[in-house]
Each structure stands twice: as structure tokens, then as C-alpha cells.
Image: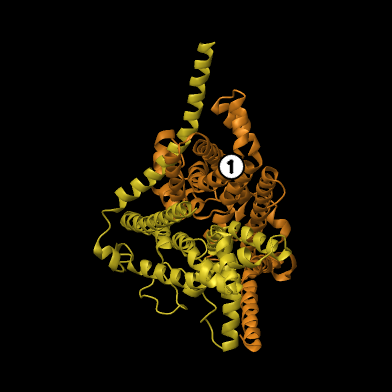
Chain colours: A orange, B yellow
């Protein structure tokens, strides 16, 4: 090969590598852009005089009423923050035991055949679109539960929370299973060799060893639950009440954006308030997810030494 | 002593059974949802339902425009997300040094992107694509309302951003499964790095990439929150021809038919039918993904 040709070849190589590298940084750019643009649309609450006549940062945390479209609009975030908390806690209360129990069963007690059946089943559950879960909770589950438990209000936080639980079970399951599987086999052999029963081994040795990963899984599910929109929009009754009663209708932060952004006057205080809710959601899920990943990474380096 | 042991055994079995019942509960949830949708929806399904537009104020007729719009937007989404996702994964696995700060940043960004709530993507699509990019394009072209409004293009790009992590993760997993010796072999025969990637590594990663593509289609088909404000329409009397038009889509149609309907008794059967179609689509896509994955896994096992 002539020198010229070879030089050309290497030039091509570095061009390709450069292009791939630039493309790869795209993910970073997107995260930044999301943050900047959500920020840009929520900042007028702090700085724009005209907007501040209608809404200020202080007003977002004063009182307990979210009534953005009325003669005397009120923008208290408390009812929808409470709504998000309520629904998320109910979802986790339901989903965490189921997901972790199933993860423990499939990695510790199930045979290989059964295991290869459980995983795809969970993946199928993960594949159900949230609008379908919302539809199911709204049209079928709500009436069913109302009849059984004699609820006064058909669409409430418990109904939405359970449906939301369906949505987060697969997330918690898969991360928890990864964590439990990562525990070295020698741990189990040692415990069994000392006379522990399979159950004792699973619960007193394997689960504690995987605990950071299992907590990461719960946090991961929590992030999912806080950010999920369609299920809560359809199944929670869509009323921003400030109520601690889980059997009342409720409205989450995500559902508020989804329900109101379509009809909001562009550039109004209400419009910027909705973006501010988005900003809060972005930051909250960011912190939850980063904590979750840090915990999971910590577990992996603890079990496999510091190399990654 | 033996009695005690037996008792412990039985207690243990019961506790194990309890965790097993968690698995059963998951299967039950799956079956019940699938069952209700099939039983409630199959009566609505007919050739006309799948091929005709809604009529009489959406209380009768079919869902064809919603299927058409969904396919349209998913195609655009794939064109945007697959090249970027595959390139990012190739960079992360083939070129990047693990400890390098850029590598860590990209990984952090991908993880973070995967956790951003879907409705926040919707807000972003509205603020960035429609108002900033679209509005900017309109101003510089001296037109009003061509790009600066909700349309298929912006909805698809929003979906693409949302699904980027999924393609990256699937591709990287596929790349990880390819033995290092394959790369070394290509390089030893005089191939350049890119040649080895292009002709040796990527062809073997295709099943894995395909799994990612299938899952992304499935997820994109069902997502409603990111597109409600970036392009999806309640109802359109015509099929969209250009990416700059609005579109109807299946997931949003289900939402509209169940929550915004003026005549709920007439629209619930349509919503049930639409849900059955959507669920059938996402289920078959997920099953395809599961089959591809288990095949490649067993091939890998044989290869070793």
C-alpha cells in the first residue's frame, strides 16, 4: 500500500471515530437541553414582573388550593404534591412486597425451567402501555373494588395506586433480581454448609448481602411511580383535593400537567406554573434515580471488588 | 428433634410458598388484564373497524386513522433514534475508555434520560421543538404556523429522545456478548478498527439491536404523555400526508374515547377494541423480542 493511500485510510478512520464520538455526546446534550428548557419556561415565576402579578414562588406554597382557572386563581402546589406522595406510597406499599417476593422466589427457589418462564412474564407486564393500565383501572378495576369494599368514590388514590403498582412491579423486580443474582454462590454454599435451611439462607444471608441493590430497586420503582402519568390521570379521579384520605379522589403533579397544559393560555402564569411542576418532577426523579444508581453501583463494587 | 426439624421444614416451605405466590399474583394480574381486554374488545374487532375512519362524531366507525398515524410517527421515531442509539453504544463499548470522564458523563446522561418522567418529555417537546426550533424556523422563513405547532415530526422526535436509552442499552448488551477474540482476529488480519466493527462486530450484534428496535416500537406505540401536546390530535377528518401535520394515534385515541367522550356508552366498545389492538401489538412485539433474545442466548451457549 502506498504511503498516500495509507494516510487516507487513517484519516477516514479518525473521521469515523470522531463522528461516532460526537453522536455519543448527544445524550449529554439532551439532558442539558431538557433541564435548560424546562427551567426557561418556569423562571418567569421568579423574574418576570407581568407574570409575577399573577403568580409568584411564594404563592406556589401558600394555602391548600390548586384552582388555576377561576376568577381568583390559586396556585398552591400542596394538594398535588400530596396527591403524588399518596399515590406513590400506595403503589410502593403494594408493589414492593410482590416484586421483591417474586424476585427472591425466581432467583433462589425456582427451577431453571420455571425461571425462564417467570422472566418473560414480568417483561410482558412491563410491556403493557400505561394508557392500557389506566384504561383497565378506570373501566374495570375501579367498579370491581368499589363493589367489594363499598367505596363511596369509585376513582380514588387507592385505585390509582394499585394500578400504578402494576406499572412499577417489573422495574423493581428486574433490578432486585439482578442484585440478588449478583450475590456470589459461595455465600449460599457457606450458609447451607453451616446447616441453614434454604429459606434462612435466602432471607438471612442472600437478601442482606443484596440489600443495597434491593433498596436501589425500590428507589428506582419510586422514581417510576412519581413520574408515571397516564395511569394516575385516568384512574385517580382527577380532583386536586387537599386530603390525606386515600379513598378520596386525587390528582398528582404529572396528571396536573397532562390535564391542564392543553387548554392553558400560552405565556400566562398558569402556563409557567405547569412548567415549574415539570421542573420539580425532573429534579425529584433525577435525585431519586441517581441515588438508586449509586446504591446499585456500590453493591456491585462491594461484591466484585472495586473494578468495574 | 425430628419433629422440630419437620416443623421447621414445613414452616420454611410455607414461607417459600408465600414468595411463590407473589409470582402467581404477577401472572394473575397479567392474565386478568389480558382477559378483560380480549373479552371486552373482541366483539368490536372487524375488518371495517380496522380499516375505516371514525364516523358520527367518533361514536361509530373504526380506528384506521389512529393506526395510520401511529405507524407514521413510529417510522419517523425509528429513523431518528436507531442511528444515534447504535452509534452511542458503539462508542461506549468499542471506543471509549471506561474510566474516562466523557464516558462517565455519557453513561450518567443515559441513565438519567431513562428516568425522566414521560410528561416532562412532553413539556420539553413543547418548549424546545415546537416553540424554540419550530417557532424559530417559522420566524426565519417568514411563515406562521408551519413548524411552530404540534405535528408528527415533533412528536416523533420527542418519542425518539425518550427511547434513546433503550436502544443504547440493548445494543451495548449485544456488543458485550461478542467475544473479544473476534475483534482481535479481525485486527490481526489487518482490518482497521472501524472495519472490524463494521464487518465483524456489528453484523453479530444485529439480533441484539433488533431486540432493542422491537422494544422501542412497542414502547413508542403505547406512550401517550409525551405526544399529547407535541402532535397528537383528538380527531382529524383526513389522513396526514406530511410530517408537519397533526396525527391521530392509538394510545391517545383510547384516552380520548374513555375520558373525553360525550357519549361514553357508545365510545367504550370502540376504546375496548382499540385497547385490544394496541395490546395485541405490544404483546406480540415483546414476545418477538423475548424469542430473539433467547435464541441468541442459546446460540452463545452453543458457541462456547
- SS for dot 1: helix
Binning the other alpha carbons within 10 Å of mark 1 as few (below 14), some (14 to 19) or many (20 upward) gives some
Residue B167: x and y, percent?
Answer: 53, 63
Residue B188: x and y, percent?
Answer: 59, 69
The residue lying toward the viewer, choosing from B198 and A246, is B198
Q: Is residue B164 above or below residue B147?
A: above
Residue A144: x and y, percent?
Answer: 39, 40
Image point 54% across, 87% down: which residue?
B143
The residue lying toward the viewer, choosing from B286 and A139, is B286
Q: Is residue A77 left or right of residue A236?
A: right
Q: Is residue A144 above or below residue B133?
A: above
Q: Quadrant of residue B148?
A: bottom right
Q: Is residue B62 left or right of residue A236?
A: left
Give the tally of numbered discs: 1
Residue A89: x and y, percent?
Answer: 59, 42
Q: Chain of mark 1?
A: A
Image point 40% across, 42% down: which residue?
A143
Location of the N terminus of chain B by quadrant is top right
Q: Is residue A284 left or right of residue B157?
A: right
**Residue B119 visible in image:** no
Q: Is residue B15 left or right of residue A71?
A: left
Q: Quadrant of residue A213?
A: top right
**Residue A210 visible in image:** yes
The residue lying toward the viewer, choosing from A174 and A93, is A174
Q: Which residue is mark 1?
A: A89
The residue lying toward the viewer, choosing from A174 and B98, is B98
Image point 28% across, 53% down: which residue?
B42
Amino acid at each position: 500500500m502506498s504511503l498516500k493511500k495509507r494516510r487516507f485510510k487513517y484519516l477516514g478512520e479518525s473521521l469515523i471515530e470522531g463522528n461516532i464520538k460526537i453522536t455519543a455526546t448527544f445524550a449529554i446534550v439532551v439532558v442539558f437541553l431538557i433541564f435548560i428548557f424546562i427551567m426557561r419556561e418556569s423562571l418567569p415565576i421568579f423574574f418576570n414582573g407581568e407574570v409575577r402579578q399573577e403568580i409568584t414562588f411564594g404563592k406556589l406554597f401558600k394555602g391548600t388550593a390548586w384552582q388555576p382557572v377561576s376568577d381568583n386563581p390559586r396556585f398552591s402546589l400542596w394538594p398535588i404534591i400530596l396527591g403524588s406522595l399518596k399515590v406513590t406510597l400506595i403503589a410502593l406499599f403494594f408493589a414492593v412486597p410482590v416484586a421483591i417476593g417474586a424476585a427472591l422466589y425466581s432467583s433462589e427457589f425456582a427451577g431453571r425451567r420455571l425461571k425462564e418462564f417467570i422472566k418473560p412474564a414480568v417483561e410482558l407486564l412491563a410491556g403493557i402501555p400505561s394508557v392500557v393500565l389506566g384504561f383497565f383501572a378506570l373501566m374495570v378495576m375501579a367498579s370491581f373494588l368499589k363493589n367489594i369494599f363499598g367505596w363511596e368514590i369509585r376513582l380514588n388514590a387507592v385505585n390509582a395506586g394499585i394500578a400504578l403498582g402494576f406499572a412499577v412491579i417489573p422495574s423493581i423486580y428486574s433490578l432486585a433480581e439482578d442484585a440478588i443474582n449478583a450475590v456470589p454462590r459461595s455465600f449460599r454454599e457457606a450458609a447451607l454448609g453451616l446447616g441453614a435451611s434454604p429459606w434462612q439462607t435466602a432471607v438471612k444471608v442472600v437478601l442482606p448481602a443484596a440489600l443495597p441493590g434491593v433498596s436501589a430497586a425500590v428507589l428506582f420503582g419510586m422514581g417510576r411511580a412519581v413520574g408515571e402519568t397516564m395511569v394516575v390521570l385516568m384512574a385517580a379521579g382527577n380532583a386536586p383535593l387537599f386530603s390525606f384520605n386515600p379513598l378520596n379522589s386525587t390528582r398528582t403533579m404529572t396528571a396536573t400537567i397532562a390535564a391542564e397544559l392543553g387548554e392553558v393560555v400560552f405565556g400566562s402564569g398558569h402556563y409557567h406554573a405547569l412548567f415549574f411542576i415539570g421542573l420539580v418532577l425532573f429534579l425529584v426523579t433525577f435525585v431519586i434515580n441517581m441515588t438508586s444508581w449509586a446504591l446499585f453501583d456500590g453493591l456491585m463494587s462491594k461484591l466484585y471488588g472495586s473494578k468495574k | 428433634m425430628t419433629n422440630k426439624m419437620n416443623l421447621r421444614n414445613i414452616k420454611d416451605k410455607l414461607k417459600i410458598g408465600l414468595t411463590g405466590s407473589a409470582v402467581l399474583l404477577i401472572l394473575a394480574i397479567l392474565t386478568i388484564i389480558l382477559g378483560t381486554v380480549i373479552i371486552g374488545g373482541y366483539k368490536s374487532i372487524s375488518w371495517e373497524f380496522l380499516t375505516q375512519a371514525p364516523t358520527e362524531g367518533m361514536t361509530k366507525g373504526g380506528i384506521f386513522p389512529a393506526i395510520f398515524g401511529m405507524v407514521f410517527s413510529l417510522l419517523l421515531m425509528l429513523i431518528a433514534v436507531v442511528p444515534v442509539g447504535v452509534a452511542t453504544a458503539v462508542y461506549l463499548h468499542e471506543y471509549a475508555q471506561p474510566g474516562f470522564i466523557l464516558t462517565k458523563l455519557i453513561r450518567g446522561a443515559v441513565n438519567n434520560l431513562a428516568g425522566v418522567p414521560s410528561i416532562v418529555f412532553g413539556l420539553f417537546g413543547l418548549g424546545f421543538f415546537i416553540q424554540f426550533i419550530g417557532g424559530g424556523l417559522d420566524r426565519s422563513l417568514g411563515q406562521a404556523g408551519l413548524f411552530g405547532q404540534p405535528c408528527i415530526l415533533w412528536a416523533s422526535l420527542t418519542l425518539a429522545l425518550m427511547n434513546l436509552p433503550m436502544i443504547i442499552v440493548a445494543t451495548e448488551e449485544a456488543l458485550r456478548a461478542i467475544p473479544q477474540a473476534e475483534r482481535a482476529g479481525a485486527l490481526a488480519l489487518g482490518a482497521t478498527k472501524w472495519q472490524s466493527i463494521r464487518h465483524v462486530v456489528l453484523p453479530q450484534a444485529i439480533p441484539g439491536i433488533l431486540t432493542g428496535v422491537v422494544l422501542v416500537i412497542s414502547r413508542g406505540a403505547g406512550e401517550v404523555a409525551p405526544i399529547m401536546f407535541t402532535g397528537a390530535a383528538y380527531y382529524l377528518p383526513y389522513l396526514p400526508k406530511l410530517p408537519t401535520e397533526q396525527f391521530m394515534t392509538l394510545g391517545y385515541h383510547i384516552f380520548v374515547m374513555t375520558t373525553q367522550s360525550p357519549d361514553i356508552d357508545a365510545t367504550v366498545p370502540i376504546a375496548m377494541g382499540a385497547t385490544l389492538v394496541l395490546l395485541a401489538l405490544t404483546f406480540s412485539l415483546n414476545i418477538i423480542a423475548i424469542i430473539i433474545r433467547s435464541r441468541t442466548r442459546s446460540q452463545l451457549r452453543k458457541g462456547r
